[in-house]
Image (tube, grey):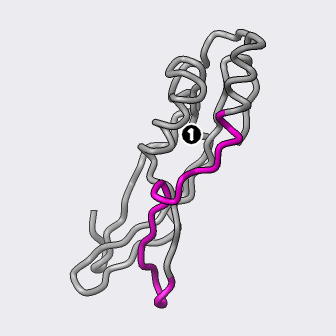
Amino acid sequence: QSREGLIVLEMAPPAREAQADPARAEWTPEEHQRISDALAIKLPSEAIATRAGQGGKHFSYIEFWKVIERTNQIFGFDGWSSTIMDMAQEYLDFKDGRTSVGYTVLMRVTLKNGAFHE
């Protein structure tokens, strides 16, 4: 939709339950040790991407697919779930024929034992 040369993005409110929480289950001692060991491993430098930002700054970030891949490796594809709790558009810029848009997203990650973090 366009108003006075600006594009306005209209989005539905974020889903409160993007995925059902996995069945609550406790980790076995072996799983707990394997997970602890995996979480202690530092991300390799090639997992971190950079991009140019406004004002000549550079930003470091991890591509979302890499986060999903690593989380699946550590917890298993059915050992965790995520839910978008809130989402807000921060900016929408047009410059030199390019459009840039930025969002802030609050996500909850829930493990199969019910533990979660936002």
Pick the quarter of the image with the C terminus.
top right
Query: In this image, 104 relative to 117: left or right?
Result: left
Q: Secondary structure at mark 1?
A: strand
Residue 30 sits in which quadrant? top right
- Is residue 41 found inside the magenta-colored segment of the image? yes
Residue appearing at x 45%, y 79% in the figure: 53
Residue 70's x, y, as percent? 52, 37
Residue 112's x, y, as percent? 66, 18
Which residue reaches farthest bottom? 55
Considering depth in this image, is 79 or 46 the residue closer to the camera?
46
Above/below status of 115 relative to 112: below
Considering depth in this image, is 111 or 73 the residue closer to the camera?
73
- Is residue 23 found inside the magenta-colored segment of the image? no
Q: Please state which amino acid type lies under the numbered disc 1.
A: Ile
Pick the quarter of the image with the N terminus.
bottom left
Residue appearing at x 54%, y 21% in the figure: 76
Residue 102's x, y, as percent? 46, 65
Q: What stretch of residues is rendered in magenta?
A: 38-57
Q: Which residue is mark 1?
A: 84
Above/below status of 43 relative to 26: below
